[in-house]
Amino acid sequence: MNFEFTLIRHGQTSSNISEKVPSAKADMIVELTEKGQEQAKETKELIKDDTFDAIFTSDMKRAQQTAELIFADKYKIQFDERLREGIVSTTEGEFFEYGTISKEEFIQMRLNGFETGETFEAQVARIKGFFDEMMTGKYGQKIAIVTHNGCLRTIHCIFHNKSLREALMMPMAKNCEVIRLNITKDENGITVK
């Protein structure tokens, strides 16, 4: 069975500009900036001729807004919490300022789960569960997914045999960047193109 996944990172948010991530509860409601809304509209134009069997998005506000701007006039959008960004902290009022630390410090924090957050390994496991379900064919074979940068990095572990550290070293996807992932699943296993 052949699957075509169109992966889209959400549009720009104020957190992307400030390089500060709020606690898990506050992070759920971070919205798109005007630029983020424009990015989503540009992506809509970019993929306007594509057709999909299903559209999925993270249930975080910024991903929902992005998905709605791109797809709401043509498709039903399904929300899935497995597509959420990694949880940095559960402590209310706390911000994680990722722009103030080195790449190595960030990697160590993601591998260890920060202080009260989720490990990158746990994030990979939940995203893998999502893709395992998608590759049953239950939702069709052409699926668009609006999600977050951390989730896009997990794909390198799941489908490109990268270690957790290697995936975290990958460059960030741009806001509203479109990534195509073609997967064949058969008796020999999974092949990624």
Image (spheres, rainbow, N blue to C red):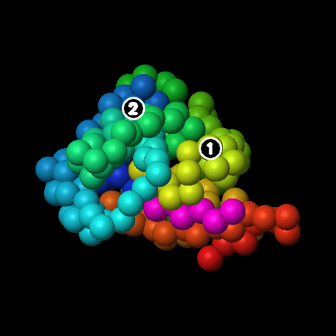
Marked residue nearer the N-terminal end (1 or 2): 2
Quarter occupied by the C terminus: bottom right
Name the element at disc 1. loop
Magenta stretch contains residue 124:
no
Rendering quarter of residue 42: bottom left
The spot of residue 10 in percent (x, y) is: 35, 52
Question: How many angstroms separate mark 1 from mark 2 (CA)?
Answer: 28 Å
Visible residue check, residue 152: no
User: Residue 82: x, y in percent?
Assistant: 57, 38
Q: Amino acid at mark 2?
A: Met
Q: Residues within 10 Å of mark 1 (few under 14, many from 20)?
A: few
| Vertical comparison of 163 with 143: above or below | below
Q: Nearer the viewer, residue 148 or 58?
A: 58
Instruction: Identify the residue shown where x is 25% and y is 56%.
Output: 40
Horizontal arrangement in the rendering, residue 134 relative to residue 23 (left or right): right
Q: Tell me which residue sits at (59%, 31%) in the image.
A: 116
Task: State the quadrant of the N terminus.
Answer: bottom right
Q: Which residue is located at x 47 percent, y 51 percent?
A: 53
**In the image, which disc is placed on residue 28?**
2
Q: Taking the image as drawn, is residue 137 in sight?
A: yes
Res. 138 mark: 1
Q: Image check: 120 left or right of 152?
A: right
- In terms of depth relative to the viewer, which is nearer, 49 or 122? 49
Q: Nearer the viewer, residue 123 or 184?
A: 184
Q: Is residue 8 above or below residue 120?
A: below
Q: Which residues are magenta?
A: 1-7
Residue 3 falls within the magenta-colored stretch: yes
Which residue is nearer to you in this view: 53 or 12?
A: 53
- Residue under the image location 27 percent in, 43 percent down: 72
How would you classify the magenta stretch by its main secondary structure?
A: strand
